[in-house]
Amino acid sequence: MTLPAPDPDLPVLQVDGLVRTFGALRAVDGVSLTIARGELVTMLGPNGAGKTSTLDTCTGFAKPDGGTVRVLGLDPWRQAAQVRPRIGVMLQAGGSHAAARTGEMLRVIARCSARPLDPDWLLEVLGLQPVARTPVRRLSGGQVQRLSLAMALVGRPELLFLDEPTAGMDPQARHLVWDLLQAARADGVTILLTTHLLDEAELLSDRVVIVDHGRVIAAGAPSELTGGPEQRRLTFGAAPGLDVELLRLALPDGFLVREMQPGRYLVEGDIRPATVATVTSFCARVGIMPGDLQVNHRSLDEVYLELTGREIRR
Ligand SMILES: Nc1ncnc2c1ncn2[C@@H]1O[C@H](COP(=O)(O)OP(=O)(O)OP(=O)(O)O)[C@@H](O)[C@H]1O
């Protein structure tokens, strides 16, 4: 049987109003999300925000309690047999047999695929060749993670779901995984991943989706989330102890000024060319030379903390 060619205009993943409940808890509370072919989208959110619960329904491991999920145009719960061969999944739980040897585990998965990648090539690329004959239970945490990624990739999936793919990896392994994901994306693979590493999200993602309490609270390209005028910040150096209230009064309403550290000042608000002029003319008026004056954007990390708050989730 010849399968129809995938429609490039059809979203690879379409989630509409997804709900997932555990007793009284709405772990996923109306999440909507669309991913086009070839996009790399990252889901961010504090512990317990509902990311894994969302992935579980997208991969067909859990039934939605409300809303719809379509993967490659199919229902991943009812049409799991058609969806599974076309997706790759890397879960936090791993999914390997503890007693199996690393290489053997990967070859078993490869044999289930119609046109797998060469398992030995993947072991080599992911630095697992030296432990190919080692039982999974004796691998380090980072090696188990790399094996899980190899297992997700070996079947040449059209869509990859990766739940915290670089958690517990050392910086070398993390860079290797980033290279591999960028290469997969360049080959047209669509990727949805979760991470708690904001630099990882900023580096890899075409778009990020921030979820909290089971809802999408922000979405867009990293540059969109960090790039608006209200996300700019102005900093400059001067002698410690400058009267920041006087500078704030010189600016229009809505600006905040504080001394971040002795002798380094931060102006937050809708930073525009006129703001820079006001700050420099204020400095001229009080007879100080602003040093190292910079206007830059806030990082994704700062935007994320502002949206989700700083308190630890239980
Ligand atoms: N099987 C389950 N039974 C009961 N509650 C669950 C179950 N699975 C998840 N939850 C709860 O649902 C909420 C969302 O959990 P989920 O694992 O989706 O969050 P997450 O965003 O992936 O978190 P993390 O970043 O810690 O992995 C949490 O409050 C969690 O305790």
Image: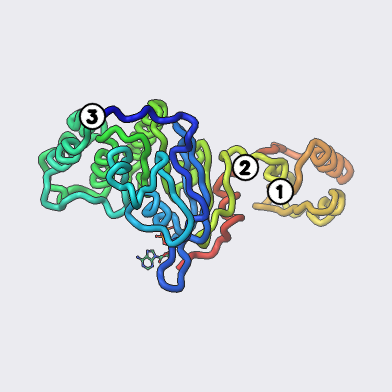
In the image, 144 versus 57, the foreground residue is 57
Instruction: Using a 10 Å C-alpha cutoff, classify the residue at mark 1 as few (fewer than 14 neighbours), some (14 to 19) or many (20 or more).
Output: many
The image's mark for residue 226 is 2
Q: Nearer the viewer, mark 2 or mark 1?
A: 2
**Mark 2 crowd level (few <14, some 14–19, many ≥20, 10 Å Cα):** many
Residue 140 x %, y %: 22, 48
**Mark 1 — residue?**
265
Compute the Cα span from label 2 to label 3: 41 Å
- Location of the C terminus by quadrant is bottom left
Residue matched to label 3 = 115
* Total numbered labels: 3
Residue 293: x and y, percent? 72, 38
Q: Secondary structure at mark 1?
A: strand
Q: Which mark is residue 287?
A: none
Horizontal side of residue 173 vs 251, given as left or right: left
In front: 263, or 170?
Answer: 170
Mark toward the start of the polypeptide (2 vs 3): 3
Quadrant where the image shows the N terminus: top left
Residue plotted at (22% across, 35% down)? 113
**Observer able to see residue 203:** no
Query: Residue at the spot x=39%, y=35% of the render?
Result: 178
Amino acid type shown at disc 1: Tyr
Asked if the residues shown at circle 3 and circle 1 are in contact, with their CB atoms under 8 angstroms apart, the answer is no
Name the kind of residue labelled 2 in the image: Thr
Residue 274 image offset from top left, x and y in percent: 83, 38
